[in-house]
Image: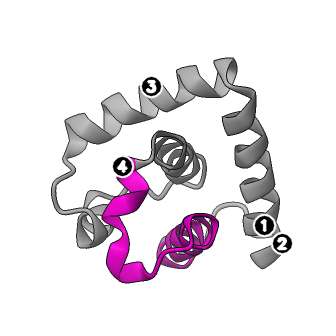
Amino acid sequence: MKKYFTDKEKVYCKIIDILCEYKGLDKQDLLEILRDKSCRHLYFLLIKKYKCCDLELIQKDFPSLNKNNIRNNVKKAEEKLLLNKHIREMYFEAEEIINEAK
């Protein structure tokens, strides 16, 4: 298992694919991910865990996000992970899918 030298863009695309599949969206409708609170929290938790917080990578799909938005959303998502069982279950399921794809 590669621990330190992973392709961030590949993992990031897998995160986007998982969220699009969950919401039944095409990649053209990515902004819908940020409108759904549980998807938004899951998105920020996963990009933090897999170190895909590269601003250029994120801004290709979500041009309105900046460093402060990302930091604040990650903080909110971490709080929700502790409090919300649904988000916690989604997070662990998505984590399994991403680890299988590596």
User: Relative to residue 5, is residue 4 depicted above or below?
Assistant: above
User: Relative to residue 25, is residue 48 depicted above or below?
Assistant: above
Would residue 56 be counted in the magenta stretch? no
Asked if marks 2 and 3 touch (Cβ < 8 Å), the reply is no
Nearer to us of marks 3 and 4 is 4
**Residue situated in front as seen by the camera: 62 or 49:** 62
- Badge 4 or badge 2: first in the primary sequence: 4
In the visual, does 75 lie left or right of 67? right
Q: Residue at x 55, y 20 (%)?
A: 79
- The residue under label 1 is 97
Nearer to us of marks 2 and 3 is 3
Residue range highlighted in magenta? 9-35
Q: Residue at x 24, y 64 (%)?
A: 59
Which image quarter: residue 3? bottom right
In the visual, does 32 lie left or right of 100? left
Question: Is residue 102 visible to us here?
Answer: no
Q: Measuring from the top left, give residue 62's x and y in whole percent.
A: 26, 62
- The residue under label 4 is 35
- The residue under label 2 is 100
**Residue 76 marker:** 3
- Badge 4 or badge 1: first in the primary sequence: 4
Secondary element under disc 4, as helix, strand or loop, is helix
